Image (tube, rainbow, N blue to C red):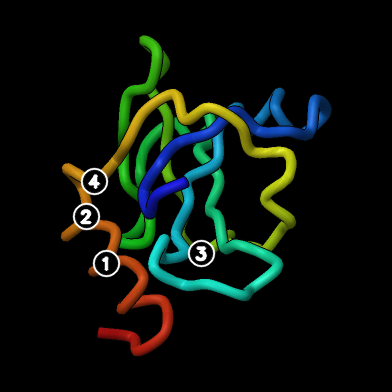
Amino acid sequence: MRQFDVFRNPSLEARKVAPFLVMLSSHHLRGIDEVIVAPLVNDAAETVCLLEIRVEIEGQRLTLIVSELFSLLPTGLHGAVASLVYLEDDIRRAIDRLFTGF
């Protein structure tokens, strides 16, 4: 698992709204049980702030909602379906805004 990899949401119920999760934790960290992810949701008509990033995964237009990041055990995350490394700068800016306001 690498930072910015995209995985299918392991929760079948939550997958209806957030079909994918994006790994935000660095893959260089070791010894931490949980990882930090943010959901890719399919119900956002348009981005409403600088904490949201539009992407397309498997033909679906989705929105990465950085403000809804959470931790989970990585045991349910299998086989990355995509990578958002090409959006690394945008994602890092959104994370910075979330925690610093700038």
Sequence-earlier tag: 3 or 1: 3
Q: Position of residue 83 (x, y in %)?
A: 32, 36
Residue 12 lies left or right of residue 33; in this view the side is right
How many angstroms separate mark 4 from mark 2 (CA)? Answer: 5 Å
Circle on res. 48: none
Sequence-earlier tag: 3 or 4: 3
How many angstroms separate mark 2 from mark 1 (CA)? Answer: 6 Å
* Residue labelled with disc 3: 67
Circle on res. 88: 2
Q: Is residue 66 above or below residue 11?
A: below
Sequence-earlier tag: 4 or 1: 4
Describe the element under mark 4 as helix, strand or loop: helix
* Residue labelled with disc 1: 92
Whether the residues at callouts 2 and 1 have beta carbons within 8 Å, the answer is yes
Whether the residues at callouts 4 and 1 have beta carbons within 8 Å, the answer is no
- Quarter of the C terminus within the rendering: bottom left
How many angstroms separate mark 3 from mark 4 (CA)? Answer: 19 Å
Dividing the picture into quarters, in which one does residue 69 lie? bottom right
Q: Please tell me which residue is depicted at 42% across the width and 84% down the height of the picture.
A: 99
How many angstroms separate mark 3 from mark 2 (CA)? Answer: 16 Å
Whether the residues at callouts 4 and 2 have beta carbons within 8 Å, the answer is yes
Q: Position of residue 59 (x, y in %)?
A: 36, 10
Describe the element under mark 2 as helix, strand or loop: helix
* Residue labelled with disc 4: 85
Which kind of residue does numbered mark 4 sit on? Val
- How packed is label 3: few (under 14 Cα within 10 Å), some, or many (20 or more)? some
- How packed is label 2: few (under 14 Cα within 10 Å), some, or many (20 or more)? some
How many angstroms separate mark 3 from mark 1 (CA)? Answer: 12 Å
| Mark closer to the observer (4, 1) | 4
Q: Is residue 95 above or below residue 78?
A: below
